[in-house]
């Protein structure tokens, strides 16, 4: 039995799968067959394995078999190389031998193929007649091929030279734009690593002015109801003054900032003084040119970046592309920061909502349960009190002569004194007891009855103290349908009997119907409007504004209830959603209104939230699902 590791190794370099398979079938019983599909892999494999014989196809990609044979001869001078070829033209064998091969086998292989391989492995070397002549011819062939390669390389160099000249001209033309893009990229790289929204906006406007040399830079963000754009960051002293005044603009096409957001296109004013859409800002008296760039993330305009120069014609249309790239990076950074805030808020809201839901549900169940368990206690207490009075009366009228010592007599006197202090006439009680029938009297002074009542009280108390609250309860069954919120809320307000003009309503034209339980949602807005009205009892000119628009998420509508009352302090804004929490004290209110609002809205798959500052009123945001058609 022959072991593969002791068999001679034959390397076959051939690009044809069929030829390699044929040779493998013919020789694998006697030799270890190594294979390569192209000459470059074959050269590497030969160098790594040092085979005993190399069979080399003549017609190969990248280089001919004879070129490969010459390379292999130099690498492995002692390894016999045999060229196999279908070329039967005159001189084919001689050209193969001139390249360094020891033999030539013609294709297709005949029955002598295996014996021919054996002979070459055993040292057979074919003699080349007129060797010098064939070697010179082969060398000339190599020289001509080398010259052809040189000519091809020279042509490629000339083409590259021409392309280089074209690129240089292009680079020269785009130099200004390139500088803008580089600066924009640097700004984008700097700001995208900042996740804190306030820090991000402040840093962005300052670095834009520093990098581009602008007179002023400011970032406006759109409000949730898309009514205003508010300045959230501004560079320099002017920016600080405007931020202190909560500077904002209406989101309309009357300003460059508003128009850039609505159209999602950059706006340029080359002569700001002559532009109708330029907002005359007393904080920025030296503005001569202005550009407003929309901050767009995922096809949604978050706001706008305003850049201003104290030079006329400071911007060109070409600058839009470069600077918009920077604005897009800033928008992505703002969106990331907002998403981070939303994620944190959503996580907190989920925890808060689930906690409040559990507390509200468990509290209601606990109150009902405790009421049931506590119901027997008052009756039992009263019976114990009555029984105790009778027993005290008997004890107070005990025969003092029968008492064995002074301490017992003193105890009896103490009973009498304390009963008198409690306005209990023990003599009168004894008189009543004397008039009773024996059965009635025995029942009144029954120790067993007294202990039974005490046991009832004890069991109820222990049970109440051992409550295990079930924090998860089934949601209330809802009857959802298509509801026109504007009509429903208008009717709700009309039924509340509030003074004329207190409630003002604003509804968007394209606001769709909501898909909710009308009775439950009516309770939500009744509670919110009622709370606002009661909170403004000392407000000189109370005003409640109810407005509705389609939410940014097209699957929801957004309704806001805003008042100009005293506002809700920050420290209790989380507590207002908890059942039984109220700020009304003894003036009424159960503390269940807002917790019920949250539970109803959340059960509908919506959300409710609050924005309020002390002294600046309160604004509730209610998001509800729309009717799906």
Image: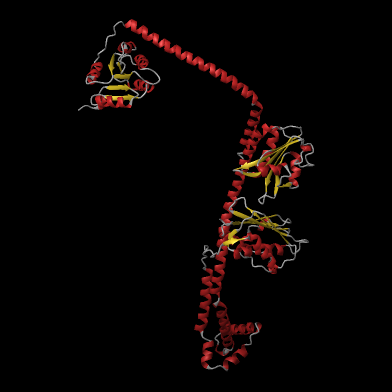
Q: Residue at the spot x=61%, y=35% of the render?
A: 189
Residue 183 visible to an observer of this rendering: yes
Residue 594 locus on image (x, y percent):
63, 62
Q: Quadrant of residue 13?
A: top left
Identify the residue at the far left of this view: 1
In the rendered structure, the answer to whether residue 113 lies left or right of residue 546 reads: left
Residue 599 visible to an observer of this rendering: no
Residue 451, above or below 325 = below
Q: Residue at the spot x=60%, y=66% of the render?
A: 519
Q: Residue at the spot x=45%, y=13% of the render?
A: 148
In the rendered structure, the answer to whether residue 67 lies left or right of residue 377 reads: left
Q: Give the quadrant of the N terminus.
A: top left
Instruction: Identify which residue, 611 or 516, lies in the foreground.
Output: 516
Residue 186 locus on image (x, y percent):
63, 33
Instruction: Identify which residue, 382 or 269, lies in the foreground.
Output: 269
Residue 185, above or below 498 = above
Residue 301 locus on image (x, y percent):
64, 44
Instruction: Identify which residue, 448 or 73, lies in the foreground.
Output: 73
- How is the protein colored in the picture? secondary structure
Residue 388 locus on image (x, y percent):
57, 83
Residue 626, above or below 402 = above
Q: Give the quadrant of the C terminus.
A: bottom right
Total numbered labels: 0
Residue 380, above or below 319 = below
């Amino acid at each position: 039995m022959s072991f593969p590791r002791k068999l001679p190794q034959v390397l076959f370099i051939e690009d044809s799968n069929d030829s390699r398979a044929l040779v493998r079938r013919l020789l694998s019983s006697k030799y270890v067959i190594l294979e390569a599909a192209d000459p470059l892999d074959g050269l590497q494999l030969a160098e790594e394995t040092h085979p005993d014989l190399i069979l080399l196809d003549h017609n190969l990609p990248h280089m001919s078999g004879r070129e490969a044979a010459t390379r292999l001869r130099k690498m492995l001078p002692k390894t016999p190389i045999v060229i196999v070829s279908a070329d039967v033209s005159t001189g084919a064998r001689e050209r193969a031998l001139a390249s360094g091969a020891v033999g030539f086998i013609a294709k297709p292989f005949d029955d002598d193929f295996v014996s021919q391989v054996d002979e070459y492995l055993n040292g057979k070397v074919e003699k080349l007649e007129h060797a010098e002549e064939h070697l010179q011819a082969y060398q000339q062939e190599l020289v001509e091929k080398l010259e052809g390669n040189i000519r091809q390389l020279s042509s490629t160099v000339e083409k590259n030279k021409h392309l280089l000249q074209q690129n240089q001209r292009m680079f020269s033309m785009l130099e200004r734009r390139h500088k803008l893009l580089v600066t924009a990229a640097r700004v984008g790289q700097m700001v995208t690593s900042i996740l804190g929204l306030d820090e991000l906006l402040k840093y962005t406007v300052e670095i834009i002015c520093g990098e581009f040399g602008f007179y002023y830079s400011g970032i406006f963000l759109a409000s949730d109801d898309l009514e205003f754009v508010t300045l959230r960051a501004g560079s320099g002293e002017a920016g600080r003054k405007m931020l202190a005044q909560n500077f904002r603009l209406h989101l309309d096409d009357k300003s460059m900032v508003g128009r850039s957001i609505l159209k999602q296109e950059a706006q340029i004013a080359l002569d700001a003084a002559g532009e109708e859409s330029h907002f005359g800002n007393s904080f920025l008296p030296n503005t001569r040119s202005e550009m407003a760039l929309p901050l767009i993330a995922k096809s949604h305009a978050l706001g706008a970046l305003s850049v201003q120069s104290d030079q006329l014609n400071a911007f060109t249309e070409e600058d839009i592309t470069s600077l918009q790239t920077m604005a897009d990076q800033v928008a992505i950074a703002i969106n990331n920061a907002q998403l981070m805030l939303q994620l944190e808020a959503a996580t907190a809201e989920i925890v808060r909502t689930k906690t409040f839901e559990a507390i509200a549900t468990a509290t209601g169940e606990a109150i009902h349960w405790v009421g049931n368990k506590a119901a027997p206690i008052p009756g039992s207490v009263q019976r114990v009190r009555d029984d105790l009075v009778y027993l005290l009366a008997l004890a107070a009228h005990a025969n003092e002569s029968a008492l064995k010592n002074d301490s017992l007599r003193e105890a009896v006197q103490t009973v009498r004194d304390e009963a008198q202090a409690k306005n209990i006439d023990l003599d009168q009680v004894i008189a009543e007891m004397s008039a009773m029938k024996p059965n009635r009297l025995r029942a009144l002074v029954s120790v067993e009855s007294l202990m039974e009542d005490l046991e009832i009280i004890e069991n109820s108390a222990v049970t109440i103290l051992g409550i295990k609250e079930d924090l998860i309860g089934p949601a209330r069954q809802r009857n959802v349908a298509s509801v026109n919120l504007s009509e429903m809320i208008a009717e709700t307000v009309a039924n509340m009997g509030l003074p004329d003009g207190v409630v003002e309503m604003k509804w968007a034209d394209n606001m769709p119907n909501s898909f909710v339980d009308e009775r439950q949602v009516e309770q939500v807005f009744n509670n919110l409007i009622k709370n606002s009205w009661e909170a403004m009892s000392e407000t000189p000119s109370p005003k409640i504004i109810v407005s509705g628009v389609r939410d940014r998420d097209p699957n929801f509508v957004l309704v806001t209830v805003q008042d100009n009352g005293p506002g809700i302090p920050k420290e209790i804004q989380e507590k207002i959603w908890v059942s039984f929490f109220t700020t009304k004290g003894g003036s009424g209110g159960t503390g269940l209104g807002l917790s019920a609002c949250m539970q109803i809205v959340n059960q509908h798959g919506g959300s409710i939230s609050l924005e309020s500052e002390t002294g600046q009123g309160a604004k509730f945001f209610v998001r509800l699902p729309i009717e799906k058609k």
